[in-house]
């Protein structure tokens, strides 16, 4: 499957601050999906990006797909304790998902 | 509500025994389901694609004789870990395909002693 690299692996954030997690591929992606997995839970779909340069927002979450469709980012503003968890990007190919390593987010109150 | 269920949610077994994990699609007849494995603090790795009425498709490096997959109906896929060893201890998660996203089950935590 398609390889996607994701950084950083860990993100320790002060409550109220912003952070960004990045996903990169050496090949052009047809689309990129983002999932969130809470501690002890299972991945839950957040969003899919398909178009070059696409930007989508969900409240405090902003998702971006690069112009070359080789990278993507998730930016969270004003981090809250409810944002704790691991955020994965995933490349979809024939319905198979190749997940990035994930960014595990912890929040300091 | 949940669209995919798994049973059991956790299981402890002795080395050398076999364990069966069930994955059910609750709201949709799924001809295809997916099985993933996730080791602690690691990402999800696709093990195999379960196909209703035909053989499963395994990813490279996954032993098909060790991880038996059966998809006998449109709502049920099972994964049997045969002759389990401690290194098979992991979080096993199934999923079914949605319109474009995947819906994941709650996962089964397997511990082999």
Image (cartoon, coloured by chain):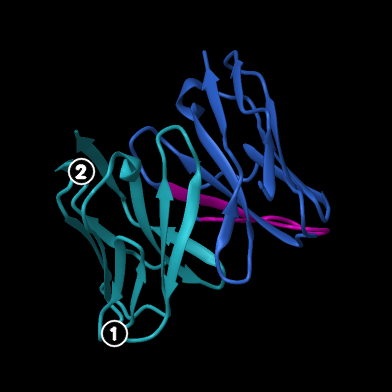
Chain colours: A cyan, B blue
Compare residues A22 and A91 and report the one nearer the observer: A22
Residue A39 locus on image (x, y percent): 40, 34
Q: Is residue B61 visible?
A: no
Dot 2 alpha-carbon crowd within 10 angstroms: few under 14, some 14 to 19, many 20 or more: few
Identified at 31% across, 69% down, the residue is A63
Compare residues A10 and B12 and report the one nearer the observer: A10
Q: Which residue is mark 1?
A: A53
> What secondary structure is found at the residue carrying circle 1?
loop
Residue B91, above or below B26:
above
Identified at 50% across, 42% down, the residue is A42
Q: Quadrant of the rendered structure where residue A3 is?
A: bottom left
Of the numbered discs in the image, which one, if any, rests on residue A10?
2
Dot 1 alpha-carbon crowd within 10 angstroms: few under 14, some 14 to 19, many 20 or more: some
Q: To which chain does the residue with label 2 belong?
A: A
Q: Quadrant of the rendered structure where residue B19 is?
A: top right
Q: Is residue B57 left or right of residue A15?
A: right
Q: To which chain does the residue with label 1 belong?
A: A
Residue B20 locus on image (x, y percent): 71, 31
Identified at 35% across, 42% down, the residue is A82
Q: Which residues are magenta?
A: B44-59
Q: Quadrant of the rendered structure where residue A98 is?
A: bottom left
Main SS, magenta residues:
strand
Residue B104 locus on image (x, y percent): 58, 49
Compare residues B57 and A13 and report the one nearer the observer: A13
> What secondary structure is found at the residue carrying circle 2?
strand
Of the numbered discs in the image, which one, if any, rests on residue A8?
none
């Amino acid at each position: 499957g398609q390889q996607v690299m994701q950084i950083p692996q860990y993100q320790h954030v002060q409550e109220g601050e912003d952070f960004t997690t990045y996903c990169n591929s050496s090949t052009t992606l047809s689309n990129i999906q983002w999932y969130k997995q809470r501690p002890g839970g299972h991945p839950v779909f957040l969003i899919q990006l398909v178009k070059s340069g696409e930007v989508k927002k969900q409240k405090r979450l902003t998702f971006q797909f690069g112009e070359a469709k080789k990278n993507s980012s998730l930016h969270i503003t004003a981090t809250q304790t409810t944002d704790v968890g691991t955020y994965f990007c995933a490349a979809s190919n024939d319905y198979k998902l190749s997940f990035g390593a994930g960014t595990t987010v912890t929040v300091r109150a | 509500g949940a669209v995919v269920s798994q049973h059991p949610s956790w299981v402890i077994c002795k080395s050398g025994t076999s364990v069966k994990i069930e994955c059910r699609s609750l709201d949709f007849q799924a001809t295809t389901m997916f099985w993933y494995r996730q080791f602690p603090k690691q990402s999800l790795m696709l093990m195999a694609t379960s196909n209703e009425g035909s053989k499963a498709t395994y990813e490279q490096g996954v032993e098909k004789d060790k991880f038996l997959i059966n998809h006998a109906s449109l709502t049920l896929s099972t994964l049997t870990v045969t002759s389990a060893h401690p290194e098979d201890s992991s979080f096993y998660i199934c999923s079914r395909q949605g319109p474009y996203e995947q819906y994941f089950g709650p996962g089964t935590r397997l511990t082999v002693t």
